[in-house]
Amino acid sequence: MVLSVFRTGLNSEFVGIWARIPLFWRCQLLGWLAFIILSLPLRMVVLGGTPSAAIVALYRDGLAFLLTTFVMRLIYRGLFRRQVTMKRIAVAVIAVCLIGGLAQLGFTLALHQVGDFEEEKVLTGFLRFGVLLYFSAGVLVCWSLLYFGIKSMRAARDRELRLAKAESARREAELQMLRAQVNPHFLFNALNTIRAGVEGFGQELRQELRDIVHSLAEYLRYSLEHGKRELVPLGKEFEALVSYLRVEKARFRDDLEVDCQIDDDARVVAVPGIILQPLVENAIKHGRETSKIPLKVRVHLFCRDRERVYIEVSNTGNWIESQHQKKAGGIGLENLRRRLDLLYPNQNDLMIAKEDGWVTVRICLPKSMRDANAVARTDC
């Protein structure tokens, strides 16, 4: 009984250690070990004995193991990261495998100068050179195909996982945005503003109330029409934000000053929905804690080049890290950062700048989702 428990513990510990080894090394060790075992009977027949077959497997497969691990892997990882075309990958694989085969052939011939090997009696002259080169390069080609195949499958799996996480985060953000849009606190403030106006008199107040109700209706309409879309034009997001800020402006009046600008080129860029409102909500909420009255909020959306769009939301006041972490409203900056990382892996940038009494949150995104769906870097 004790022995059984001891063996079970050893097996569990071994499985745990093996699981912590990177996938590449697990495949590399098991793959070459299986190749040596499966090719050993054939080598025994061709070379006429177990010792010769074992020696050949030791130096030739050992050299191939070193080449694939420390040379070919580095070259292929570079090709994979640069996302070159399949044609260039095929050319690179052929060239690398031929060079690797020639290196193995040269090492074999040099080794045969100092030892007697049975395969020299079976293969002679140029036939020996051709067979050795064909066999060595062929093994490297098979390894290359397996490498790119496994790496492509892992990249596809990781891409699907990122998209699933992004969809989950989008749904979470959508629900939180809808809560904010139909948030009792938000509606309470808006309706209080309208009620206060109703109690007053005069054509000017009635016109202001009509504008507030119209802005509130436009904002809620946007949430209904675009709440379930993954990507929306930045111009639509901007217009919904303007409606939101009209209501906030009516609430805070002279205590809030707003400056909203968007370039024409930026209007057509597709961006994740629910990206502007959390930033502005955060600027107003936390800006009011540290800014002098009136609180000033700027929203600038622009394109500096053909590939990227920039979103800048600024407010007067100071950045207080601890307060921000404890009181972050809406989906929060960290939630937004996580969502952008899922949708634009290695392609987005969210920065916080503090200067001259202003706090600015700046987001930089690619104009096209094609770059965002690039294959992620893996350890393989």
Image (spheres, helix red, strand yellow):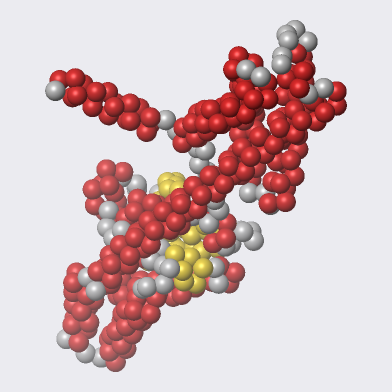
Q: Residue at x 27, y 58 (%)?
A: 329
* Relative side of 174 to 264, left or right: left
Please tell me whether residue 306 is drawn above or below residue 25 in the rendered image: below
Locate residue 82, reporting x and y percent.
Answer: 64, 45
Judging depth in this view, the residue of 23 and 55 nearest the camera is 55
Judging depth in this view, the residue of 195 and 97 nearest the camera is 97
Q: Residue at x 62, y 59 (%)?
A: 307
Judging depth in this view, the residue of 206 and 331 nearest the camera is 331
Give the position of the N terminus as an image quadrant. Answer: top left
Any part of residue 186 in sight: no
Q: Residue at x 32, y 55 (%)?
A: 332
Locate residue 72, reporting x and y percent.
Answer: 64, 33
Locate residue 265, reporting x and y percent.
Answer: 59, 69
Judging depth in this view, the residue of 253 and 32 nearest the camera is 32
Q: Residue at x 49, y 31 (%)?
A: 30
Which corner quadrant of the image does residue 197 belong to? bottom left
Locate residue 155, reporting x and y percent.
Answer: 51, 49
Which corner quadrant of the image does residue 160 belong to? bottom left
